[in-house]
């Protein structure tokens, strides 16, 4: 039986925690682990923001403020990941940023699992949770593939990633940005600027 959205979200949380342990332990694969953490967090955030949070805000209106706060926390985590990607993995600054990222994400996970997800479970029935799980999984997989491609581009030293273009579009308040392709984001930013 397919998993419901709450099971999928919490499974991602556990996977990120394991990756954090590897990232904090150091080692030669730190850049690869950071790329995986970054890809997973971005994919998870996009899927939640586009597929889950609108349902929570509509069906559990008492959670609207927490949903908005969660989106801010996603943005904070993505900013920390970008800073980590631009920092020497052998430096003390890298270790400090890893600690900041881990603390921020753990706080987010704790709040989400103790407030947002229980409110969602109360607001919708089991069938809807499974349907939402399919939508979450589909969007997460799309975003994960995009993020992994962008990590490979970044390692090659290429053009701005979709994540960077998305961040710029967010700052420019370009509507519809979450459903745009990388090229559409670049075009929208070019036409705005």
Image (cartoon, rainbow, N blue to C red):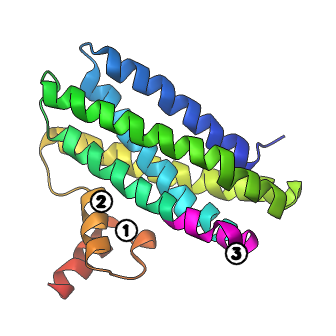
C-alpha gap between disc 1 and disc 3:
27 Å
Q: Residue at x 31, y 37 (%)?
A: 100
> Residue 168's spot in the image, x, y percent?
24, 69
Q: Is 158 inside the magenta-drawn segment?
A: no
> How would you classify the magenta stretch by its main secondary structure?
helix
Position of residue 135 relative to residue 177, above or below, is: above
> Residue 192's spot in the image, x, y percent?
20, 86
Q: Which residue is mark 1?
A: 181
Q: Which residues are magenta?
A: 57-68
Quadrant of res 36:
top left
Under tag 3, what secondary structure?
helix
Position of residue 14 relative to residue 28, above or below, is: below
Along the horizontal axis of the image, is 68 left or right of 137? left
Residue 113 badge: none
Q: Residue at x 66, y 42 (%)?
A: 8
> Residue 107's spot in the image, x, y percent?
49, 42
Along the horizontal axis of the image, is 170 left or right of 168? right
Q: Are marks 2 and 1 in contact (CB under 8 Å)?
A: yes
Q: Earlier in the sequence, mark 2 or mark 3?
A: 3
Task: Indicate which label's residue lies in the foreground, 2 or 3.
Answer: 3
Q: Earlier in the sequence, mark 2 or mark 1?
A: 2
């Amino acid at each position: 039986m397919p998993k419901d959205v709450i099971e999928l979200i919490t499974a991602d949380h556990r996977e990120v925690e394991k990756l954090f342990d590897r990232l904090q332990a150091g080692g030669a694969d730190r850049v690869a682990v950071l790329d995986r953490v970054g890809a997973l967090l971005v994919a998870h955030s996009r899927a939640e923001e586009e597929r889950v949070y609108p349902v929570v805000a509509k069906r559990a209106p008492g959670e609207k403020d927490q949903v908005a706060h969660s989106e801010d926390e996603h943005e904070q985590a993505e900013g920390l990941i970008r800073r980590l990607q631009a920092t020497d993995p052998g430096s003390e600054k890298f270790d400090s940023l890893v600690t900041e990222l881990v603390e921020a994400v753990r706080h987010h996970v704790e709040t989400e699992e103790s407030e947002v997800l229980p409110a969602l479970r109360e607001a919708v029935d089991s069938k809807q949770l499974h349907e939402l799980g399919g939508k979450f999984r589909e969007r997460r997989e799309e975003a994960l593939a995009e993020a992994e491609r962008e990590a490979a581009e970044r390692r090659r030293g290429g053009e701005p990633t979709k994540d960077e273009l998305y961040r710029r579009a967010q700052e420019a308040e370009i509507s519809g940005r979450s459903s745009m392709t990388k090229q559409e984001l670049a075009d929208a930013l070019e036409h705005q600027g």
